[in-house]
Amino acid sequence: MTWLKLLQFCSSVVHCLSLHIPSVNATVTQLLDPGNLVLIQNDDKRVVWQGFDYPTHHLIPYMKLGLDRRTDFNRFLTSWKFPTDPGTGKNSLRKYTSGSAQIFLYQGSEPLWRSGNWNRLRWSGLPVMMHRTIINASFLNNQDEISYMFTVVNAPVFSRMTVDLDDYLQRYTWQETKGKWFSFYTAPRDRCDKYSRCGPNSNWDNSLAEFECTCLVGFEPKSPRDWFLKDGSAGRLRKEGAKVCGNGEGFVKVEDAKPPDTTVARVNMNISMEACREECRKECSCSGYAAANVSGSGSGCLSWHGGWGRKDLCVCGCHHSRYASI
């Protein structure tokens, strides 16, 4: 058995790890340039352990967030327990791989925020992304892994992501001239960005002054009393007499919106938007569709079925369009 200990000032143990390795002399510890502490087996140069697999509350360049499908090893962030205690806290940032993969911020088991799906350019729920000349974000989804990683294009730039104690995901960059970290973005950004603020068959619109929850076309409040008290959590119902499947229903375009929760969305990357629309129109259960790939003129198909197609829809300046059935 090999023991790996990290010491503070040569005495206080910061971290202790035990590994089953046949020979103690067969390994060497290295600190790589990106900051990854690795334990390497001498004979075949195989990495038997690396610190980047255990990111705690920070994600830095070259760290991966997500699932290694070969080993079923899941990498995720957790907040500290207290400001002075780095133990596992209540908040976590995890990749959810069902449907069209997203990143979720959780408090315990309750979702607080989601990134939206990766649309080949960015996470659809993040309207602000660092310019690609500074930060390069990448998403990988193949038979071996599903992961997110970012790198710094220009070496003098320092950037990090962290999950804090106050239920937020923060992206920081280092300002050399001021000698401090600058908050580049925060998620959730506002009340609209929090998970499922309005109930089914509605969306949240920050441009509205009175009440931000709005009904989708063809729907009305399930509980008018709660609605007028500015509580939209009960959701909306289809209006009496509204057209249903097979009676001439169509679609309404919801502009500039974070697509609904894609956890149970159907994904088909091999068809056009026109074909996606036709597929959705043919199925009574299809409640909406959107482009899976927004690069170029848009392609691929995300479709939602049943009530899931109207969950956590937010008009939030995300530069993404989605079509809801009416």
Image (cartoon, rainbow, N blue to C red):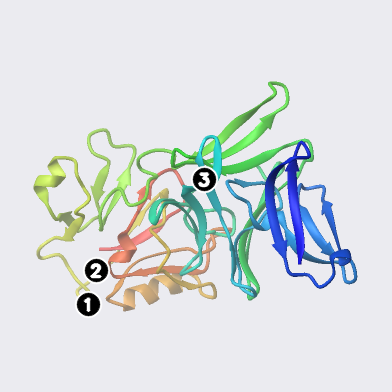
Disc 2/disc 1 C-alpha distance (Å): 7 Å
Q: Earlier in the sequence, mark 1 or mark 3?
A: 3
Residue type at mark 3: give it: Ser
Confirm whether residue 271 shows in the render. yes
Residue 315: where, in percent of width, then height? 37, 46
Residue type at mark 1: give it: Gly
Q: Residue at x 13, y 41 (%)?
A: 228
Helix, strand or loop at label 3? It is strand
Badge 3 crowding class, 10 Å Cα cut-off, few under 14, some 14 to 19, many 20 or more, is many
Instruction: Please indicate whether residue 193 sits to the left or right of residue 96 in the image.
Output: left
Residue position for label 3: 79
Helix, strand or loop at label 1? It is loop
Seen as rendered, the residue at the extreme top is: 178
Residue position for label 1: 246
Helix, strand or loop at label 2? It is loop
Badge 2 crowding class, 10 Å Cα cut-off, few under 14, some 14 to 19, many 20 or more, is few
Instruction: Please indicate whether residue 222 sits to the left or right of residue 124 in the image.
Output: left
What is the number of the mark on residue 249? Answer: 2
